[in-house]
């Protein structure tokens, strides 16, 4: 493999130099961005992240989009053309990528320069085995920190792969507080190094659904009023064509799309991250090219050729693109489904794959217009299709458990797990106490269907997050206040709203099976389930019908009707369960701590579609460093 990504970024592709992305606080020249060579000592990699309330198309953008060059000026965030408030890291969207070699130490000083919101940063995909208190899970591992405050995150980059960082509180991720973390292995430790020539920074791609208003406004309008929860658009690396401007001649003008350069004849590794927040799975494909998927959520899999893949919020896929077609410009396509799909907002986006040539400039676009209907591939093989499991007879669909991990068999795949948990979910007709108030406007009182929103829950319980952080203030936490499906068994949680600190607990070293069931009664929803601190083997995934129940899944399992891939199932940390179906995950609980397990749709996580996966007793968990901040309530003692 030729490691030129660093040099290439700033010199080879002249166009990038022009646009100034090699200067300043984007860390594109960070010394840790280097060829990963075995035998060389690991590095300590420092970053300063300034979190700010900011705006798209700010004055830094001058005459963007009318002058395209201006859209790439320092601190210009063009988005898809909407003018809206955003939250940025170093005034970039996405925030600067962290690119390191395995075993480096990542040190990020996060400075909260927002006006009034507290914040917290999660390092999605990093397992934090030696530093569980650096996980950035609000009130689980630490307290969010205040405006004017800062927090130094320090953790080893132990697990390789394509990961990302994002705020884990409120709607901050939605508003732009995210960026890539790439942990590369040495050539010897990279099972796919022979399959590609380049692994370039500029081929990292963060996609997300995007709205013309701030996330909090969208959220409040939906939760308290009749506003929708549907995103009209998608952006790719902070750019997209959506809002139409008109130039002096009345001709339509758009913000430029993202652009990815390749040289004919070479094979490139692309890394795709979905930072999305609403129910908007995105199908990606590239005109004229098939690709080969080599990694999911940072875990290598046997190279699998596909034409397209669906990617859910929180997921990552790496693929190889062989630039062996004629020298040209090609559309890269991103097509929404479900709440941003054919029957809803019809969201789509494009980017450009540009073969290097004197024939065209960075202002040229491929021939042909892309609209929603042709924003997908024409046939071919698809991976991770929305709401499809191994029941499918369609030979052109590859389902996650069919991917083959390149990791060796491990104990998590033993025949019988030590613990098994059924975690079922759906949208329920309960009066979530944050959004309804009995007897004034309880769920049953509301008649306008747009205001009668259902509550997504795990096992009919909404997660009530404590005001103290479980891990860092463990001595002040009384575990007897925790709840689960058994402690709530005498409550009528199917009808009355149940709100408590939902915790499932296993001893260190146990092999655990998690059976996620999407009952699918309400509508064709989808919940990408994300687990902190671990990756799990996706051993089964099946859609049983338009809806299902825990009992049905249990009964099928007892009859031996559920087949598990216990040979080489792929490792993932985020997976979406087919609506009306189940996914079975396996892991060995070797990372003690309190780990967040939640839906990665921001709105769902925030309203309690979450729980805590506790591994071990308090004493099994690593102590937090001295002086680690605390939080909690103040109530004066009675005299
Ligand atoms: C666009 O703006 C740049 C300055 O950012 C300027 O140098 C260039 O001449 C402008 N291009 C056009 C076509 O006006
Ligand atoms: C292009 O590359 C792909 C993947 O390596 C390969 O399957 C295909 O045959 C190649 N096509 C041509 C025209 O060389
Ligand atoms: C991509 O693969 C499909 C089969 O899955 C094939 O029909 C198609 O021709 C391939 N496209 C290219 C450009 O190789
Ligand atoms: C609670 O969940 C556990 C694990 O999934 C299960 O074994 C148990 O039967 C459930 N209890 C109730 C009351 O549903
Ligand atoms: C809401 O429904 C409850 C139960 O049916 C009823 O007692 C109450 O009066 C209703 N409230 C309003 C404002 O209609
Ligand atoms: C599932 O829902 C679809 C669309 O609403 C409907 O056409 C189909 O008949 C349903 N299937 C079953 C088995 O109920
Ligand atoms: Cu969800």
Image (cartoon, helix red, strand yellow):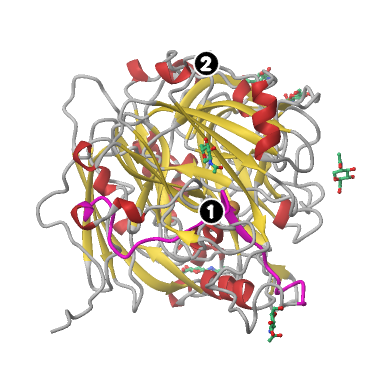
The C terminus sits in image quarter: bottom left
Decide whether the magenta segment is chiefly helix, strand or loop.
Answer: loop
How would you rate the neighbour count of disc 2 (Cα within 10 Å): few for under 14, some for 14-19, many for 20 or more?
many
Assign a secondary structure to mark 1: loop
The residue lying at 68 percent from left, 67 percent from top is 453
Front residue (pair 512, 242): 512
| Closest to the observer, 624 or 218 | 624
Q: Are marks 1 and 2 in contact (CB under 8 Å)?
A: no
What residue does disc 1 label? 490
**Sequence order check, earlier mark of 1 and 2:** 1
Name the residue located 57 percent from the left edge and 64 percent from the top edge: 497
Q: Is mark 1 within 8 Å of ligand 4?
A: no
Residue situated in front as seen by the camera: 278 or 542: 542
x and y percentages locating residue 363 in the rendered image: 60, 54
Q: Residue at x 37, y 27 (%)?
A: 3
* Foreground residue among 379 and 452: 452
Q: Which residues lie in the magenta part?
A: 447-474
Quadrant of image for the N terminus = top left
Q: As drawn, which residue projects farthest toward the front?
A: 490
Is residue 534 rendered magenta in the image?
Answer: no
Q: Percent from the top left, x then y, of residue 332?
A: 65, 43
Q: Quadrant of residue 256?
A: bottom right
Measured as percent of width and height from the top left, residue 2 is found at: 40, 23
Q: Which residue is mark 2?
A: 568
Q: Secondary structure at mark 2?
A: loop
- Compared across the picture, whether 6 is left or right of 14 comes to left
- Residue 548 appears in view: yes
Residue 213 in view (yes/no): no
> Does residue 560 lie above or below 360 as drawn?
above
């Amino acid at each position: 493999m030729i490691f030129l990504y660093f040099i290439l970024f700033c010199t080879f592709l002249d166009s990038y130099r022009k646009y100034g992305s090699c200067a300043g606080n984007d860390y594109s020249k960070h010394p840790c961005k280097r060829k990963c060579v075995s035998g060389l000592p690991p590095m300590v990699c420092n970053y300063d992240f300034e979190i700010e309330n900011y705006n798209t198309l700010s004055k830094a953008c001058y005459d963007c989009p009318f002058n395209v060059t201006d859209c790439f000026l320092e601190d210009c965030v063009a988005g898809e053309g909407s003018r809206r408030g955003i939250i940025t890291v170093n005034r970039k969207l996405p925030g600067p990528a962290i690119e390191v070699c395995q075993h480096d130490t990542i040190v990020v000083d996060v400075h909260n320069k927002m006006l009034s919101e507290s914040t917290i940063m999660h390092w999605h995909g990093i397992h934090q085995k030696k530093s569980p208190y650096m996980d950035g899970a609000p009130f689980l591992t630490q307290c969010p920190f205040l405006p004017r405050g800062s927090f130094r995150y320090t953790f080893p980059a132990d697990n390789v792969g394509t990961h990302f960082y994002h705020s884990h509180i409120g709607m901050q991720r939605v508003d732009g507080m995210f960026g890539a973390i790439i942990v590369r292995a040495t050539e010897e430790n990279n099972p796919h190094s022979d399959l590609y020539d380049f692994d370039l920074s500029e081929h990292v791609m963060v996609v997300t659904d995007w709205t013309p208003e701030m996330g909090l406004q969208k959220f409040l309008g939906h939760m308290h009023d009749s506003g929708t929860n549907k995103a009209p658009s998608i952006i790719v690396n902070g750019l997209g064509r959506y809002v139409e401007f008109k130039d002096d001649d009345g001709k339509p003008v758009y913000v430029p799309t993202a652009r990815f350069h390749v040289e004919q004849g070479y094979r490139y590794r692309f890394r795709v991250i979905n930072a999305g927040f609403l129910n908007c799975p995105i199908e990606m494909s590239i005109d004229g090219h098939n690709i080969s998927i080599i990694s999911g959520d940072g875990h290598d899999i046997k190279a699998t050729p596909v034409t397209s893949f669906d990617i859910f919020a929180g997921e990552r896929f790496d693929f190889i693109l062989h630039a062996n077609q004629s020298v040209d410009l090609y559309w890269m396509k991103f097509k929404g489904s479900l709440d941003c799909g054919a029957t809803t907002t019809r969201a789509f986006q494009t980017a450009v794959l540009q073969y290097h040539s004197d024939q065209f400039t960075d202002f040229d676009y491929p021939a042909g217009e892309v609209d929603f209907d042709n924003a997908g591939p024409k046939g071919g093989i698809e991976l991770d299709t929305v709401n499809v499991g191994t029941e499918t007879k369609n030979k052109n669909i590859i389902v996650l458990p069919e991917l083959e991990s390149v990791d060796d068999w491990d104990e998590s795949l033993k025949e019988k797990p030590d613990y098994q948990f059924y975690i079922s979910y759906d949208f329920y007709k309960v009066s979530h106490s944050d959004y309804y108030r009995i007897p004034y406007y309880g769920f049953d009182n509301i008649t306008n269907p747009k205001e009668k929103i259902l509550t997504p829950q795990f096992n009919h319980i909404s997660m009530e997050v404590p005001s103290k952080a479980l891990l860092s203030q463990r001595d002040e936490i009384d575990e007897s206040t925790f709840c689960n499906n058994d402690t709530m068994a005498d409550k009528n949680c199917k009808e009355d709203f149940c709100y408590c600190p939902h915790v499932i607990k296993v001893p260190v070293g146990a092999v655990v099976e998690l059976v996620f069931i999407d009952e699918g009664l309400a509508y064709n929803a989808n919940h990408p389930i994300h687990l902190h601190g671990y990756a799990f083997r996706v051993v089964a995934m099946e859609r049983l019908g338009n809806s299902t129940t825990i009992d049905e899944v249990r009964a099928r399992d007892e009859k031996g009707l559920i087949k598990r891939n216990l040979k080489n199932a792929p490792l993932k940390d985020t997976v979406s369960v087919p609506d009306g179906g189940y996914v079975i995950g396996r892991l060995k609980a070797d990372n003690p701590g309190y780990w967040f397990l939640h839906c990665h749709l921001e709105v769902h996580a925030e309203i309690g579609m979450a729980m805590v996966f506790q591994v071990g007793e308090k004493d099994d968990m690593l102590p937090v460093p001295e002086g680690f901040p605390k939080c909690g309530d103040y109530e004066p003692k009675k005299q």
